[in-house]
Image: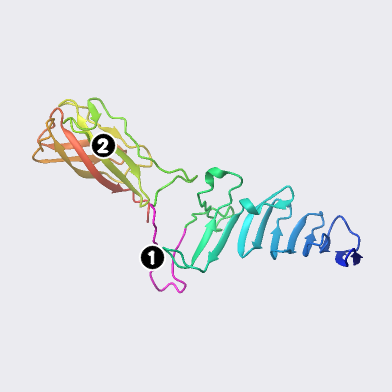
Amino acid sequence: MQFIGNFVTFLIIPTGATTGRRITINLNNDGEIKVYNSAGVLVDEIGGNDGRIIAYDSSGTRFVAMLDGQLLDGAVTAGVADTANAGQFYSLLTGSPNFGARTFVKSPMGGNAAIANRVVLNLASGAASTGLFNPQIILGDEAGTANADFNLSGTVIKTTVTGSKYQWQTPVLGANWALGSSTGVTFDDFQYRLDAEDNVVMSGVFNAVTATPAATVFQFPVGYRPTNSVRVIVATSNNVGAAIAGQSAMVIANTGLVNVSNNPAIIAGQSYYVDAFFPLHNIA
């Protein structure tokens, strides 16, 4: 313990140590207690004007902190906890115009402004040695006896395992099939996509250029194919837009091959108007 200037007190344990395992108290008149491991790496920091409690990893590259009433998690930059770009978790007890008290979760920016408007959660179940076995979010009440509703102001969108959104896909059609309607009226071209409920959603129009188009309209790729064949009823019209009496359908095989079933027989310019979906049965 030493007295310097206006009786500023600091303490180093062991006395005089500057490397290796040690504890410093108020060394720079900052009101902090700092703990270093045997490699001389700062692993704990307590105190300061903001009452911080920070734990660092043993390599001094990451930190978890309680700071200004928030929980922070982030990287160490130039030996200092980068709190500005850290992930944050905190609650506000005061209400807002649309919500009451609320909890905030913010992903660390990592200096990348492009992801500043996202919350990215990487889940690990811990059930396997990698910690990545079938991660999932289960929402329930504390006792497990009541329904727990999930309210969302946006849209649930299915993504790949790396977080990329599944987009609308445009198929490559067989011979003498064309996208859109033959009637001269503008409709959306036929497309398909995966939704968040394990369904293939189909929407839009395609048409037969001749009365003898290829038997296969198109083929769904792997990942979009039903377990067993699926039959989807569709509306049809002739090339001037008049509805065709009878029944037409898309038949989708488990190989992904798509053909049409028509009664009466197909005619040149026949348009197929699709607004349907089918389940993939990946959800048990």
Question: Residue, x 48% and y 46% (percent of image)?
Answer: 161
Is 122 placed above or below 175 here? below
Q: Residues within 10 Å of mark 1 (few under 14, many from 20)?
A: few
User: How far is the residue under mark 1 from the one under mark 2?
Assistant: 35 Å
On the image, numbered disc 2 is attached to which residue?
Answer: 188
On the image, numbered disc 1 is attached to which residue?
Answer: 149
Residue 128 falls in image quadrant: bottom right
196 lies left or right of 50? left
Residue 217 — which label? none
Is 127 placed above or below 171 here? below
138 lies left or right of 251? right
Residue 25 falls in image quadrant: bottom right
Is 8 placed above or below 106 here? below
Q: Position of residue 196 (x, y in %)?
A: 38, 51
Q: Position of residue 86 (x, y in %)?
A: 62, 53
Q: Is residue 71 magenta?
A: no
The residue stretch that appears in magenta: 137-155
Element on which disc 2 rests: loop
> What colour scheme does the image use?
rainbow
Element on which disc 1 rests: loop
Question: Residue, x 9% and y 41% (percent of image)?
Answer: 246
Q: Is residue 138 magenta?
A: yes
Task: Please state which amino acid type lies under the numbered disc 1.
Answer: Asp
59 lies left or right of 244? right
Task: Please state which amino acid type lies under the numbered disc 2.
Answer: Asp
Quadrant containing the C terminus in the rendered view? bottom left
Q: Position of residue 143 (x, y in %)?
A: 45, 74
119 lies left or right of 77? left
Q: Which comes before the other along the chain, label 1 or label 2? A: 1
Residue 15 falls in image quadrant: bottom right
Q: Main secondary structure of the magenta part?
A: loop
As rendered, which of 258 and 136 lies closer to the eye?
A: 136
